[in-house]
Image: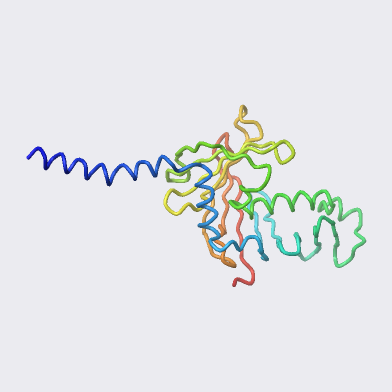
Amino acid sequence: MVPIINMIKKLLLIFLVPTGLSAQKLTAFDIVSKSIYAHDPFNNFEKFEGIFNYQIVRDKQATRNFTLAFNKPKDSFEYIVNTDSVSFKQKIKKGKCYLEANNRKKISSDLIKKYDITCERTQYLEKVYNYLFGLPFKLKDPGVIISEQYSEKFFNGKTRYEIAVEFEKNTGTDHWYFYFDKKDFLLAGYKFHHDISKKDGEFIYLSDYEKFNGIIMPKTKKWHWNQTSEHFRTDKLEIVDKK
């Protein structure tokens, strides 16, 4: 009887130990790589082109509607607004800025002031939206510092992998945390602080995933304040010319 029990114990060790070792070998970088593959298994992001209608809904504020156009092969980004009273386009292409309002390149000072139609603003929008639309792929960009360790934290109703990310001085100054689903490795959301000691900044829940040009993207982002957890904004994405 004893030899049989010992044999059973050995068999259990054979099957259980590799699983444990596999779990121990998982690194934060592995999680990011698995997430990138889950969102974009055929590396379509490198040649990404897309047009999106974007809506930002805030409590007690007017809803913002605009269009974003990305073209990575042509190194181009456009922010387009069309309303009954005004239409304007802000564009960055190969590092150069192009502005127009009501189909004219000469823009009145009143429109510039009211809608902030400036190259500085356009460069800011290009940086922000390329980063947010490029997640999790942008986590492998130069200047991004991924923590070697990861944690497991409760985030939007589930326990997720949490990975801390910082940036080299010339890249960024905020402290970010990214949350990944433990089963499919899709990016579930993120949090950032300008100053961790003040617990400032925001966290964002991602949902309503849809495939666009071979890439799985979230269509809804819900924003909350870190200090109070209060929801203050919802971004809704409509994919145009879905392939």
Quadrant where the C terminus is found in the figure: bottom right
| Residue that lies at the very extreme toward the front in this rendered image | 3
Q: How many marks?
A: 0
Question: Residue drawn at (60%, 45%), measured in percent from left and top?
Answer: 232
Question: Is any part of residue 69 visible from this angle?
Answer: no
Q: Nearer the viewer, residue 13 or 178?
A: 13
x and y, in percent, of residue 3 in the image? 11, 40
Q: Residue 99 in the image: state x and y as whole percent.
A: 85, 59
- State which quadrant residue 190 falls in: top right
Q: Residue at x 64, y 69 (%)?
A: 240
| Residue 85 screen position, x and y as percent | 80, 63
Placement of the N terminus among the 4 image quadrants: top left
Task: Please identify the residue farthest to the left as the structure is shown.
Answer: 1
Asked whether the viewer can see residue 34, the reply is yes
Q: Is residue 74 left or right of residue 174?
A: right
Check the image and tell me how it is coloured.
rainbow
Q: Position of residue 106 (x, y in %)?
A: 92, 61
Q: Nearer the viewer, residue 132 or 168?
A: 168
Image: 88 above or below 163: below
**Residue in the picture at 56% in, 40% down:** 177
Q: Is residue 150 left or right of residue 242?
A: left
Image point (60%, 58%), residue name: 236
